[in-house]
Amino acid sequence: MPSVEILVVDDDEALRTSVSRMLRGIGHVVREAVDGADALRSVRTAPPDLIITDIMMPDSDGIELIGAVKTIHPTVRIIAISGRAAFGDLDLLNLASMIGADVTLTKPMSPDELLEAVASLTAG
């Protein structure tokens, strides 16, 4: 698997750190952001190859981030993750797909499931 730059966005520090450590362990360059606003600042400075973002976060959420990233850098690949599949009648992961997420995963996801999604989006 080729090394790519990945931005991991999640307000859950333990999950963000765990995912980042796993991705670094297989040779990827990883940056972290605590929410959508923090991630967007990072993307504007230097767009990554891939973003893994939670959907439900305080301040600026993953839906806002996906829309903004796809507007300014449409080639950036995105994996949207959420432990809460719906917000009222709104299917969050379906909405994420509709606005540009390439893959959606429900938390908790297995390490293998996440690595498979990363590999599918970063293969040569």
Image (cartoon, rainbow, N blue to C red):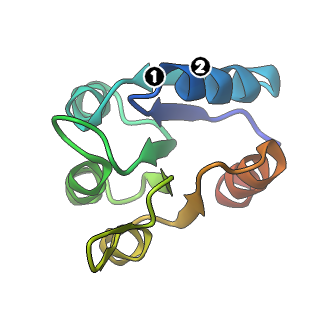
Q: Residue at x 44, y 44 (%)?
A: 53
Q: Earlier in the sequence, mark 2 or mark 1?
A: 2
Q: In the image, 50: left or right of 1? A: left
Depth check: give the residue in front, 76 or 113.
Answer: 113
Q: Assign a secondary structure to mark 2.
A: helix
Where residue 2 sits in the image (x, y, percent)? 77, 39
79 is higher (above) or lower (below) than 36 = below
Q: Assign a secondary structure to mark 1.
A: strand
How many residues crowd mark 2 within 10 Å: few (<14), some (14–19), many (20+)? some
User: Seen from this angle, which residue lies furthest left?
Assistant: 59
Where residue 33 sits in the image (x, y, percent)? 38, 24
Q: Amino acid at mark 1?
A: Glu
- Answer yes or no: do the residues labelled 2 and 1 have beta carbons within 8 Å? yes
Q: Amino acid at mark 2?
A: Thr
Depth check: give the residue in front, 76 or 87.
Answer: 87
Residue indicated by mark 2: 17
Q: In the image, 98: left or right of 14? A: left
Residue indicated by mark 1: 32
Q: Quadrant of the C terminus?
A: bottom right
Where residue 3 sits in the image (x, y, percent)? 72, 33
Depth check: give the residue in front, 111 or 115.
Answer: 111
